[in-house]
DNA sequence: TAACATGTTGCCCATTGTGCATGATTGCCC
DNA sequence: GGGCAATCATGCACAATGGGCAACATGTTA
């Protein structure tokens, strides 16, 4: 789609190699337990290369959630659906496809890290927005002309905006990797998603 | 409400003094045209104090939009409305009250600055989230018990999420301080807001 | 294959982040 | 009002970071 040059593939690979190393380190030592040199040493790159891809440690740590490959599957799903499927339904399946168990697990880890390190929060929001732009691009390409551009943008914004409250942990939601017995009074992530889309479908 | 100590008031004052100085400088010289020392020198504080309030230059620059006082008026508006007003309508008036012309003017400036300096984007998102949390708190306090907490959170998330697409300038919307003749084919911000709430009210 | 474009690296240094200690200001309780 | 506790602003010192520049390595294109 957007990436095809071998050069671009390698560039993306180094970025994710560094980001993954950063995520490993933050799990092992906590956010204050390592420096940029530790990241690039583990990933096998130079410190200067780090600055070519990320503006700070926070960004690298958080970007690792995007290294999870759910994008291609999402594209296949989209193209396989009836052409008259409403955008909201497309987006529902897109969310369930893109927000894999592994991605949500990483998210949950980053959420708990954000409690101790609030500097992570802006970059968490940034990652959510990246996911949103991905979905918008898929939606826009599929519905080009049939819906005004503002419609898909507002819809995607509302969907992701509704999910963002999970970032501060204020909602009692159990993520897919958590045991139901751990959080007996929490609703599951799937239930939360269904409820959210129900609101959006029927109106508030 | 949450702030009443003289100490807290002073602390908030220094933060906004620094943030306002940062915003002045970014308008005068562009984001790369000044350093933290320039900010604190203009505001009359020490560099160490800057670090007590902000984690980086980006954060200081964008936080200046929150220095605009629209919060108290918003609270008064809320308490003056009928008790059975639906949350969506409350939120509509809250948005029109809180997103003043001056705030939107600053936002537009920061949006154009973000084109040249993408590092600003995460902190722009963070500011939007701060505004969202403000509104959630007002809503939550007003409706405590009558609606589930998840409802107000999802609603506020959807509303602000729908507004966020304005941040990348992908939507052709004319801000209140712009002349209609400048952007003949753009919809006004008020029209955009009305359209957004119409979607949210009736469902997608 | 040759010219070109771009990613990676090392070097260098201005800028930044932060732990710690200190004085000044404010909150609180008697 | 007086005294103690909490915390804000500040200075210092030093590690950590960001980014310009130039060299080299690798992919791209004609």
Image (cartoon, coloured by chain):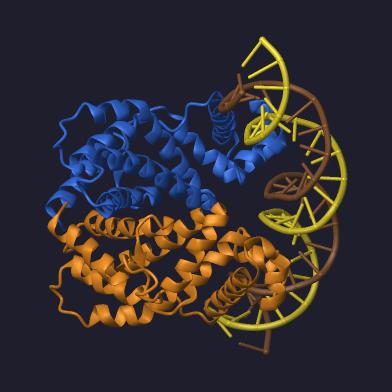
Chain colours: A orange, B blue, C brown, D yellow
- Please determine whether, in this image, residue C7 is positioned above or below residue A155: below
Q: Nearer the viewer, residue A40 or D8?
A: D8
When asked about the image quadrant of residue B187, the answer is top left
Q: Residue at x 19, y 45 (%)?
A: B146
Where residue B67 appears, as percent x and y from the top left, is 47, 31
Whether residue B88 can be seen here: yes
Q: Is residue B201 left or right of residue B44?
A: left
Q: Nearer the viewer, residue A6 or A201?
A: A201
Whether residue B184 can be seen here: no
Q: Residue at x 17, y 62 (%)?
A: A198
When asked about the image quadrant of residue A54, the answer is bottom right
Where residue A134 appears, as percent x and y from the top left, is 37, 67
Where residue B31 appears, as percent x and y from the top left, is 59, 42
Q: Is residue B34 left or right of residue A107?
A: right
When asked about the image quadrant of residue B18, the answer is top right
Q: Is residue B179 left or right of residue A9?
A: left
Q: Nearer the viewer, residue A175 or A121?
A: A175
């Amino acid at each position: 789609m957007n990436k095809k040059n071998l050069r671009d593939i390698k560039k993306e690979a180094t970025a994710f190699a560094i980001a993954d190393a950063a995520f490993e380190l933050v799990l092992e030592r906590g956010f204050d337990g390592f420096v940029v040199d530790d990241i690039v040493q583990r990933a096998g790159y130079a410190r200067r290369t780090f600055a070519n891809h990320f503006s700070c440690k926070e960004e690298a740590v958080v970007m690792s959630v995007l290294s999870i490959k759910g994008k291609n599957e999402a594209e296949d799903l989209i193209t396989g659906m009836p052409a008259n499927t409403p955008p909201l339904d497309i987006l529902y399946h897109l969310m369930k496809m893109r927000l894999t168990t592994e991605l949500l697990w990483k998210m949950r880890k980053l959420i708990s890290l954000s409690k101790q390190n609030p500097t992570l929060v802006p970059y968490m929001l940034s990652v959510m927005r990246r996911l949103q732009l991905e979905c918008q691009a898929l939606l826009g390409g599929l519905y080009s002309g049939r819906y005004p551009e503002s419609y898909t943008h507002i819809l995607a914004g509302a969907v992701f905006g509704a999910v963002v409250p999970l970032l501060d942990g204020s909602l009692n939601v159990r993520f897919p990797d958590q045991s139901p017995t751990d959080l007996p009074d929490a609703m599951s992530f799937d239930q939360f998603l269904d409820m959210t889309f129900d609101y959006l479908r029927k109106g508030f």
